[in-house]
Amino acid sequence: MERTVFFLDQKEMPSRWYNILPDLPEPLPPYISPATGKLATPQELSRIFPMELIKQEMSNEQYIDIPEEIQAIYRTWRPSGLHRAFQLEKALDTPAKIFYKYEGSSPAGSHKGNTAVAQAYYNKKEGIKRIATETGAGQWGSALSYSCAMFGIECKVYMVKVSYNQKPYRRILMETWGAKCVPSPSTDTKAGRDALAKDPLSGGSLGLAISEAVEDAVTHEGTHYSLGSVLNHVILHQTIIGQEAQKQMEMAGYYPDIVIGCVGGGSNFGGIANPFLKDKISGKHKNLRCIAVEPMACPSLTKGLYAFDYGDVAGMAPICKMYTLGHDFMPAPVHAGGLRYHGMSPLVSALYHHKLIEARAVFQIPTFEAGVLFARTEGILPAPESNHAIRVAIDEALTAKKEGKSKIILFNLSGHGHFDLASYDAYHQGKLEDYEYPIEGVKEAQKTLPKVSL
Amino acid sequence: MERTVFFLDQKEMPSRWYNILPDLPEPLPPYISPATGKLATPQELSRIFPMELIKQEMSNEQYIDIPEEIQAIYRTWRPSGLHRAFQLEKALDTPAKIFYKYEGSSPAGSHKGNTAVAQAYYNKKEGIKRIATETGAGQWGSALSYSCAMFGIECKVYMVKVSYNQKPYRRILMETWGAKCVPSPSTDTKAGRDALAKDPLSGGSLGLAISEAVEDAVTHEGTHYSLGSVLNHVILHQTIIGQEAQKQMEMAGYYPDIVIGCVGGGSNFGGIANPFLKDKISGKHKNLRCIAVEPMACPSLTKGLYAFDYGDVAGMAPICKMYTLGHDFMPAPVHAGGLRYHGMSPLVSALYHHKLIEARAVFQIPTFEAGVLFARTEGILPAPESNHAIRVAIDEALTAKKEGKSKIILFNLSGHGHFDLASYDAYHQGKLEDYEYPIEGVKEAQKTLPKVSL
């Protein structure tokens, strides 16, 4: 009898993260300091990050041990289950075999916990008593709030004001874990006060919230800043997903032909794909396809430029080489808030540049269509971000059907949609919009790219 | 190295439910028909329930096989994890060892799925195409909506209007699974129209919603009614919780001294406790204590009368012998909506009557205090109902500390609180109230008990 979910025993949970950096065809371009225009130094970065994470960011070790203290917290929800989507396959009448790794069982409901716990731990170890961060829809802010509670660290979250007002449940969740959450722009920072002086009714933006959190970190003693995606160390921490999935696919008796994840900053995709990409790079599974799925409203990989750009709107974060729509680009208000980032992780960008992965942009309404079909067949209610991965998994399964091929498809179900039901309501009521990629706006935004000469 | 979560392999998932009826000191008192005042017959019940469930309701078999079709759906989230609450123990500085079984990983977020899947299956097997039910806060309605989606059955949910308006996320969740959800009182039934004629602004009640759902079932061809707690077959389906917990406690190397669950209708408590009670009844673990925890605002076990009463406010459900506050009793609006039931499962009532279990009533604010401490230590955000069990688990752990005894405590974490964050907000803001048990009101309500002569 075949099983629906493949569980690993906790003793089989990977005890190391996989670092793909040494396996890349060539080294990643370096980070540039926005202050000096020169190579960013570890010393500069150490004003906001613990040295252990900076080392991981630039490490050339293929594997990095997961400290026991982090493993202990991971064991609250890890190893996460790998599901065979029998019911979805049946509904699609496809010869493809569809598997998904479910990361929504973490306390905050998404893969974000994998790095939040690690980041809280390394900060704690360095004597940090307080962490400031930003959050958009709240997935990252709640994962970090949870993790700070686990290690007894104060947590201050600057939440984009529009979301703060629209999604009170996410705020209350953070507060229940003991975090302080304020709407951004706030009066707690100069950046916030300046923004409010210009426009007292400002609904805020992720870029501004980042600026507030970074300013908070550098102006408070014992405080660091924490980022939930984009950076190498964040993707590193997420590789536990793909490593577990490899063991579980082995239990299931298959190796995937296609691995799929949605991309905003790129961390859940890198987390599931990188351990498999190791096999592709080594030639062991050279026909493996990995597909990064992004919203048509914010298609940095498929329509962006591979160039040096700022990581944030305010130009305070390091400059890095990535696929970008320009740091001034303001994406349309799609409900997959976690995918509304102008750039892309430098690491995922390099994988795409070297043609190790594919990218695909999808419209919003078909992603919800896929999410509802998934909920009605597999039962789990997916986050709007995860619906992007589901959409392409379904499309690939339908292609397999057309071609009469029994493809093995694996995707990352990065989180649940319990706090995103308003967007499902909009879908049910036919009120969702599909947003075209505004090519002119992006051309304008790309004119603002910083000049970097190495 | 000790583990945080004990997972069972899916092959070890129990394949039978445990029926405690034949192990009781004496048979349960029979159900009485509200229509005839005489013993309720299976034929009468078959107007609203499938015959297979009616047989289970009255079965004297100690074990009943779980059909493979139900096991297949269970495997979406089962076996559920048994957690050792290391962080909570540390915060309490107690020598007690605390374990909890987490039922919130089911798609609808609580233990309700265990019986919803089974009920949908047996109805499907009998050719039923549509199921009507009521829901208060929405836990049951969403579990049944999910289960009906799994078996391709239409689902109609009458949701108490106050909750329908206050908790739109629960409604949207049901709709996403394809159910039709209307506020009760509705214009879809005579009961609803009568109520609206009397009071067009009526916010509804659980009793009225039951009446609407039962009327819907008996007036629509191919439609049955479904109940999410109270009845024997519901508790039977929940015994998978306790059976799994027994295997997992064995993995952990302990047998519990105390098993704790919250009680409204009694099904999650019966589900975890009954398999352990088997050991108590047989004399194998005669010192085992099982504690049913109820809200002080609705203390049917600790303050109610053991008497024949109607199962619903409208007097349409079978009359049964149970601990009751009177079917007219209207509990104060505590946030643990799932525990606001005037009566108690006849089975749990009998266990209490025979002194096989204990009962304890707790105030609302201390339950939230316990829930927040739990979230900040163990990470998982509990449902307000589950906070009742956590409160008593903590109290017992503190007693163990005072007595210097290393007690083994197991409780059922019946569900997550993702849709209950407004109540946490009220707690954080100091707006929660503690409700005293209104003894005079109950005395009045108990005067309305039906007269039954057997």
Image (tube, coloured by chain):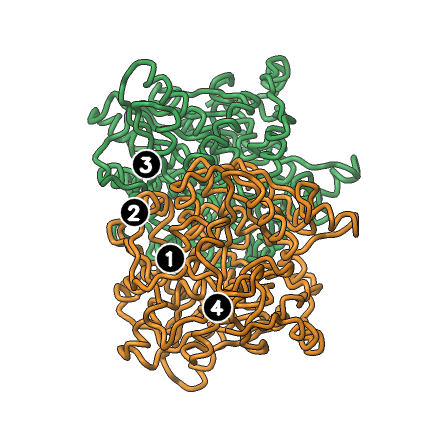
Chain colours: A green, B orange
Residue receiving disc 3: A84
Foreground disc of the pair 2, 4:
4
Residue receiving disc 1: B56
Q: Label 4 sits on what residue type?
A: Pro
Using a 10 Å C-alpha cutoff, classify the residue at mark 4 as few (fewer than 14 neighbours), some (14 to 19) or many (20 or more). many
**For the point 38% across and 48% down, which residue is it?**
B77
Q: How many marks?
A: 4
- For the residues labelled 2 and 4, say whether their Cβ atoms are less than 8 Å apart: no
Determine if marks 3 and 1 fall on one subunit. no
Q: Label 2 sits on what residue type?
A: Phe
- Observer-nearest residue: B265 or A415? B265
Q: Label 1 sits on what residue type?
A: Gln
Give above or below for B386 relative to A282: below
Foreground disc of the pair 2, 3:
3
N-terminal of the pair, mark 4 or mark 1, is 1
Residue receiving disc 4: B346
Please state the horizontal and vertical placement of residue A220, each as a whole percent of the image.
61, 53
**For the point 42% across and 24% down, which residue is it?**
A392
Q: Identify the chain of the residue marked 4, using the numbered disc in the image.
A: B
Q: Identify the chain of the residue marked 1, using the numbered disc in the image.
A: B
**Residues at marks 2 and 1, CA–CA distance in whole angstroms:** 32 Å
Q: Identify the chain of the residue marked 3, using the numbered disc in the image.
A: A
- Observer-nearest residue: B44 or B353? B44
